Amino acid sequence: MQGSRENQLSAKKGWSRCSNLTFLACRVSKRSPIAILSVNKYNVLAMSGEIVGGVLGSGFVGAFLGAYITTRVVVYRIGQAASPPAYQVMGRLVSVVIPTLMEEEYLPKLLETIRNQTYQPIEIVVADSSPPPANDKTLEICQAYEARYVFVPKLNLPHARNAGAMEARGEILVFVDADCLFTPTYIQDVVAALDEGYVLAHGADPVAEGIFFAAASLMLRSWFKPKAYTTGRGIAIWKSAFNEIGGYDERLDPTQGYREDLDLGKRVRQRYGSKAIQLLRTSYLGESARRIKYLGTAEWNKVRGVRGSKTIPI
């Protein structure tokens, strides 16, 4: 472990130098965590609590305001991952697997947030299905960030994830989409959860752009996210367990409305029990809003596979 104890504590809390104002935001629920944010010149703290009602409002207004403030903290934390961390924790090798298809715009930003994680060592495996000349550009990006490039000609997302996992050398696999960005301690957090005995660990994955969609997604993907809702964004799993359950089911094509990512979590629970999965509600990565912008809300919901008999029950 490198750096002073003071630096470790400061970076782990990670909330500093944002604003001179102080906010207290709550959500209406007795069962799920709320976000309590103290924002001042030196400190921004995010924690859980059990408060009914809202200090800054009641019902939806108070909850929405709390969610919006939390998203601003998440965006700030993502920005911290653009620079080397104040400390690093050394442990077992982690392989981050990223399936790509013409992701030249987003991939470098994601790789930058992986390079500046507080946890090391990390191996990056990019499973790329881009046609020429985009695949050449993706290869150049991988070389610049010392990531391993694996060409996957078959256009099938679960197949690309599995292909990347086969090439991975780490004891732990972390799967993430190319249009996501990590906060600095995300991988450290999910690895710590696996070290506690969990088979699979994942955090919150809100949209990190805009106002309404960012706040709404924060509620859905952090506060109200089911523990077993294992999306393809930021899940960590022991490679031995991943291989034992057969990886992602390549028959479940997400472009046809299937949820191969939720199916993976379902099979983890079937094999290892309902307590095998840990959800870290205050460990964040941010997703881009490109699908919503391109497709619109209604169509975006459809392509995520939340419909009909093709939905994988959780």
Image (cartoon, helix red, strand yellow):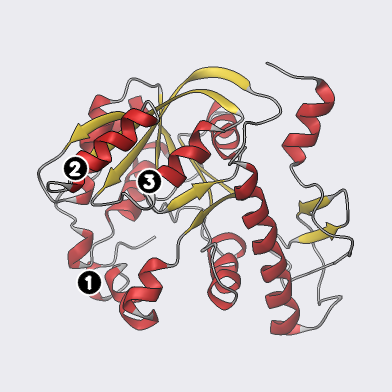
Q: Are marks 3 and 1 in contact (CB under 8 Å)?
A: no
The image's mark for residue 309 is 1
Judging depth in this view, the residue of 285 and 59 nearest the camera is 285
Q: Quadrant of residue 23?
A: bottom right
Left or right: where 137 falls relative to 38: left
Query: Looking at the image, can residue 91 be seen?
Result: yes
Instruction: Give residue 268's quadrant in the image.
Output: top left
Disc 3 from disc 2: Cα separation: 12 Å
Mark 3 or mark 2, which has the lower sequence index? 3
Q: Secondary structure at mark 3?
A: helix
- The picture places residue 40, in percent across and down from the top left corner, at 88, 56
Name the N-terminal-most of marks 1 and 2.
2
Q: Amino acid at mark 1?
A: Ser
Q: Nearer the viewer, mark 3 or mark 1?
A: 3
> For this rendering, which residue is in front, 144 or 5?
144
Q: Which residue is mark 3?
A: 107
Name the residue rendered at 35%, 50% in the picture. Answer: 266
Q: Identify the element where label 2 is drawn.
A: helix
Q: Residue at x 32, y 67 (%)?
A: 304
Q: Are marks 3 and 2 in contact (CB under 8 Å)?
A: no
Residue designated by label 2: 135
Q: Position of residue 294 (x, y in %)?
A: 33, 74
Q: Which circle's residue, 3 or 1, is located before the other in the chain?
A: 3
Q: Residue at x 37, y 46 (%)?
A: 107
**SS for dot 1:** helix
Q: CA distance from mark 1 to mark 2?
A: 35 Å
Tell me where residue 167 sits by quadrant.
top left
